Amino acid sequence: MTLLLRYLTVTLVAVAGMLICARAAQAPQHIDIKQLQVTTKVENVVVPVPDEIFAALNKLGPVNWKEYVRSSRGSNFRERPRIALLLGSIIADGFIAVQAQDAPAVKEIGQRVLTLSNGLSVRTSITPHAKAIIEAADKKKWQNVRQELDRTQNSVQSAMNELHDEKLSQLVSLGGWLRGTEVLTSVVTKNFSSGGAELLHQSDLLEYFEGKLRDLQTMPEFNMQLLQEIQGALVEVKPLIKVGSQKISAESVKRINEITTRLDYAIVTKD
Amino acid sequence: MNAFVKLLVRRGLFITLVLALVTIARASVDDAQSFALQAAEPYVKEGFQVREDYWGGDLGSGEKKAVRQQLFKGNEYWFWMGTEVERAKISVHIYDSEGKLAEQPDGWEKGHFAAAHIVPKSTGSYFIIVAVEESPEERTHWALVYGFR
């Protein structure tokens, strides 16, 4: 009897212990975000590749991606910030060409990426990816092209960070984000839906880029009209997308499209 | 001359030591990333595209870190965390910008691997909270990767 009691007590204690442990491992249902930002270091956002936005757009309905494949691969620039912005924009074009399953365009983009990376002194890191993009496009292995485009952007940025060119690396992300936003707003403007407009709820990302551009202003190498123009445009876009839980209107989407189209034209074209 | 050679040797040893420490620190975050990618592997077969970018660092037992991330409604995301410290217990959870737990119930924690799954109800910023719950090491390297489809 005593033995049975002892056995039952031990079992009860063990079960209670397990329950307590399981509860302790559960995540709280709610946390205080303001407190979190004070007590915990919050890491910066990873800038999404345009493909993430395009994937979400595809789920809203069919998109004629061929319409968005651009034939211009941009001018040849000497200024490294301009090359970095253009490279980001061209990589975004690569994702658009993949959506359109346009192999010749993808191959051209692979070549162009290689030329531009030369201008940023990171050609060695990019050569294998550019080759892989061209090969995968030849075989129409679109998933591989997507992976290699992401790797290209990542390798460019890692190589630039190693060369202490972090600022230029951020411009590659910015170029890609602007081109992605131009296409997103163009698609949504053509066939407006609140679901499509919702994809523009990216105010933290916009503030992230705004902050980076503000930092660049103090550096002579980045004191150029185009960067000032982009910063001014981001200030203009901010109230259109920072609307809290409200819906983004068709007029706002159209306006953002006008702004990003103007900026992207300036990125690919010589003054 | 002798003193000069000694100074050079001493400085050389110091630089080598610093470089070795930097390499070890880097290698460990890279190892943690390999484990995070290992956790992601089965999901690639299910159509998830794993991003090349990742976050990483080191944390003490009981410490956590937050990562802010832009997510898009319509997509589905998995976040995978890994560490090279096999006896460590780690966790990853996802909250929306209001601080509400936003993840699906099928997230998991298996020793030095953890994962969280989200189908965002709205497009916007989310907070990914990573933590080292227990570890035999003073500092535990971690890495977080994510994928979408």
Image: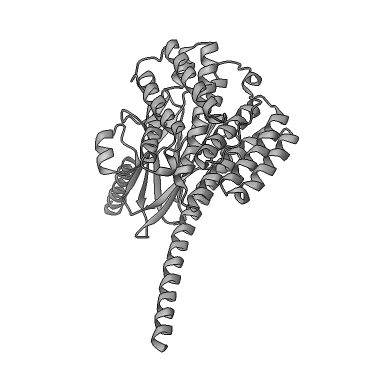
* Percent position of residue B92, x then y: 40, 41
Left/right placement of residue A181 relative to residue B7 reads right
Image label count: 0
* Percent position of residue A167, x then y: 44, 43
Q: Residue at x 49, y 40 (%)?
A: A81
Residue found at the far front of this picture: A271
| B135 or A262: nearer the viewer | A262
* Percent position of residue A174, x then y: 47, 34
- Image height check: is A264 above or below B16? above
Left/right placement of residue A120 relative to residue B130 reads right
Left/right placement of residue B19 relative to residue A69 reads left
- Image height check: is A17 above or below A91? below
Q: Residue at x 40, y 48 (%)?
A: B90
Q: Residue at x 60, y 41 (%)?
A: A116
- In this view of the protein, can residue B75 be seen by the observer? no
Left/right placement of residue A104 relative to residue A69 reads right
Q: Quadrant of residue A132?
A: top right
| A49 or B113: nearer the viewer | A49
- In this view of the protein, can residue A125 be seen by the observer? yes
Residue found at the far bottom of this picture: B2
Q: Quadrant of residue A30?
A: top left
* Percent position of residue A245, x then y: 34, 18
Query: How was the colour assigned to the protein in this rendering?
Result: one colour
- Image height check: is B24 above or below A74? below
